Amino acid sequence: MNHPYLDVLIIGAGLSGIGAACHLKKKCPDVRFGIVERRTRIGGTWDLFRYPGIRSDSDMFTLGYNFRPWTETKMLADGPSIRHYIDDTAKAYRVSEHIHFGVKVISEEWDSGKNAWTVTVLNEATGEEETFSAGFVFNCTGYYNYDAGYTPKIPGLNNFAGDVIHPQHWPEDYDYSGKNVVVIGSGATAVTLVPAMTDKAAHVTMLQRSPTYVASVPEQDLISKKLRQILPEMVVYRMARTRNILLQRTVFKLSMSKPKAVRRLLLASVRKQLGRDFDMKHFEPHYNPWEERMCAVPKGDLFKVLREGKASVVTDHIERVNKTGIKLKSGETLPADVIITATGLDLQMLGGAAVRVDGKDVNIAESMMYKGLMLENVPNMAMVFGYTNSSWTLKADIASEFVCRLLNHMRDIGAEKVMPVDDEDCGTDLNFLNLRSGYIQRANDRLPRQGDRAPWQNLHDYLRDLPALRYGNLNDGHLQFEGPHLHSQKRGFLQQLLGS
């Protein structure tokens, strides 16, 4: 089945994809666009993950869109609330009608003779392949494999008599009442699961190889709650958003410039919440703040269940799993009825789709990123990869704004092709994520590269990216525009305006 030609095809109907569609609606109202989504409803990550306590690890005033306020008072929102926000946004901007659900992208192929992409998808309900043709492809698929999370090889895990669950595929209505639960991991998922599961479990143990920085944040934004009584909603939202952006950036910069001082402050806060008798080795990482992503817990919920004895933390290495628990290298054995492998994500770019330009495979790991959103030497394509040191949506919003500006600029100058080109040989061997986290290091051979100067550096800085993406000169010498080379059978927006 061949679908009608589109000016823009958005891949993914999660937080980034719906945001991209809304920006197109606002800034490029005449562009014909479509969205393809593998799942059967809107939400992406926030539809996939359904484990107990699932929530954001970024505050909602920055994780929310810049054009539509988050109106609740929770700082870290639960997964269903976030999915509802995305769905409501799609309805408000009438983008739901553009979504093709239940299709998995197999390949994206550019043809310079047609100046168009052919995107082949698999309809997972019928088993049939379908094709979409588009002048521009905007990949909003996130950065991990939806089919399976990462689980390391754990000796003896197959011998365990209880249930082994990865949070990415949580069983519906799973009952863990009265059971001893061991959560393997120390990241955002683990610190969310542990306090959430103490409601029914007999006991929950977080088993970690090494500690992570964990910071307590307020459960609600009481300032915004009061301001809503006297100011318009959008004004309050922007004030909270600006405050939190500046706070995030300040903490990050201080972590880079004065890591010892920030470490002391973080550990002092943890010590205060856990009490003098708690062994602090479980929350004292062997690295500096923000060399790996920091975990946030609302109102110190993790520390509360540790104080109350409902949960515990063990820092050790696994020797072997037996039928009834986990034997550690220290000699201790943890009894378990349920083992949860909160061991991370399997990173995957572009949803695992093959990308080809004029029949030649594109090796993403050998490509540099232009401004953190376009691949070197790949025409008419952009992708969203949000911040790892701040809220994902901050980058997603301004990436979408950039794409809208780019499309309008192409219309204005009569171009139908644009491609980032590095004429200065400024490449390095660094991937474009500057974190030591295990899930990033494991995927180093799958991540694109970054250069040693702008615009090929990934700045990880909203305050610098904002002016560059929203207002920066598009004729910067790095974007190569070509056209028009039009074909009469196309009837998309770019072709109609450029004429043939």
Image (tube, grey):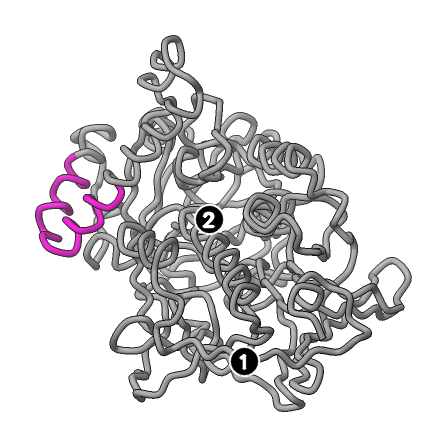
Foreground pick, 268 / 99: 99
Image quarter in which the C terminus is found: bottom right
Q: Which residue is mark 2?
A: 397
Q: Going by the image, does 408 lie left or right of 110?
A: left
Q: Earlier in the sequence, mark 2 or mark 1?
A: 2
Amino acid at dot 2? Asp
Decide whether residue 265 is among the magenta residues. yes
| Residue 177: image tag | none
Q: What residue appears at the point 44 percent right and 20 percent down from the top-left corner?
A: 233
Label 2 vs label 1, nearer the camera: 1
Query: Mark 2 and 1 residues: CB-CB less than 8 Å, in contact?
Result: no
Mark 2 to mark 1: distance in Å? 27 Å
Foreground pick, 377 / 368: 377
Helix, strand, or loop for circle 2? helix
Q: Is residue 258 above or below residue 74?
A: below
Q: Which residue is mark 1?
A: 482
Give the image location of residue 412, x and y in percent. 53, 64
Amino acid at dot 1? Glu
Q: Which residues are magenta?
A: 248-268
Give the image location of residue 33, x and y in percent. 69, 56
Is the magenta region chiefly helix, strand or loop?
helix
Q: What residue appears at the point 19 percent right and 33 percent down from the top-left corner?
A: 269
